[in-house]
Amino acid sequence: MTAEIIEISRLALHDQVASRLRTMLVEGRIAPGAKLNERELCLQLNVSRTPLREAIKLLAAEGLVDLLPNRGAVAVKLTEADVLNTFEVLAMLEGMSGELAAKRITDEELAEVRALHYEMMACFARRDLSGYYRLNARIHTAINDAAANPVLSNTYRSINARVQSLRFRTNQDEVKWKHAVEEHEQMVQALAARDAQAMRKVLTAHVLRKRDTVLALLRAGEIYPTAKSKSNKTS
């Protein structure tokens, strides 16, 4: 019994560390391309190296961290080609998820999506970007789950993980954030109407708009600031 309790405790700690580290990566508190300094993170998270390393392995499997020879774990940093290729596939996956969800969603699942949407809108009203994004991600996951296709869900999650931090940054512009909220309202309406084509259309457009915003930010040096762009901001 004691061994079982210790094992459960370890798993719980590992999950907690992974959750906190995931938030730090998504919200850019660990810069893309930065090495994950185990000593600093242990102090910051108040944990030993064992649960931290387990959490890093989990996040590497999710695509948020790259494990590189001679460098160790680094926060994922995507090239422009990576962004184009990833969002191209993601748009198709989200569109398919939306279409299938509209056909298969249960009343209970629809009620949960609506509840999450209202909570997300409250965060938008408070301009709580961190809270908004967490609920936003849960809505997209709930829609994906409602599609009731495990292969689609697993593929979607593995690909979406690599662009989570980029999606987070796309709502830092007020106009684009408002437009994203409008698209989410259209999603809830289409789900409630069981309109499969409308769901595919709005989700595909939603993701491609995110792609365009990410590319614009990337080209402007706003996502991965160069030494030159940093000096321009301080001059």
Image: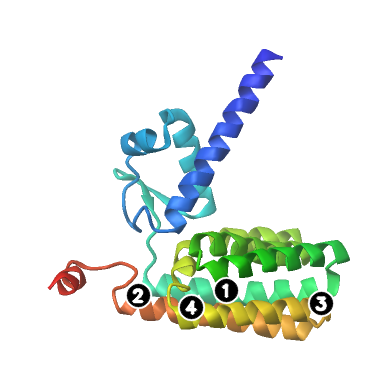
- Give the alpha-carbon distance from disc 3 to disc 2, as whole Å: 36 Å
Q: Answer whether labels 3 and 2 touch (C-beta < 8 Å).
A: no
Label 4 sits on a secondary structure element that is helix
Colour scheme of this structure image?
rainbow
Q: Is residue 45 left or right of residue 160?
A: left
Q: Residue at x 53, y 67 (%)?
A: 126
Q: Residue at x 32, y 79 (%)?
A: 219
Quarter of the rendering occupied by the C terminus: bottom left
Label 3 sits on a secondary structure element that is helix
Instruction: Name the outermost residue toward the front.
Output: 126
Residue that mark 3 sits on: 192
- Residue count near mark 1 (Cα–Cα under 10 Å), binned few <14, some 14–19, many ≥20: some
Q: Earlier in the sequence, mark 2 or mark 1?
A: 1
Q: Earlier in the sequence, mark 2 or mark 4?
A: 4
In the depicted structure, whether residue 209 falls above or below residue 9:
below
Residue 117 visible in rendering: yes
Label 2 sits on a secondary structure element that is helix
- Residue count near mark 2 (Cα–Cα under 10 Å), binned few <14, some 14–19, many ≥20: some
- Residue count near mark 3 (Cα–Cα under 10 Å), binned few <14, some 14–19, many ≥20: some
Q: Earlier in the sequence, mark 1 or mark 3?
A: 1
Residue 148 visible in rendering: no
Q: Position of residue 194 (x, y in %)?
A: 83, 79
Residue that mark 4 sits on: 211
Q: Position of residue 85 (x, y in %)?
A: 48, 74
Mark carried by residue 89: 1
Q: Earlier in the sequence, mark 3 or mark 4?
A: 3
- Give the alpha-carbon distance from disc 2 to disc 1, as whole Å: 19 Å
Nearer to us of marks 3 and 4 is 3
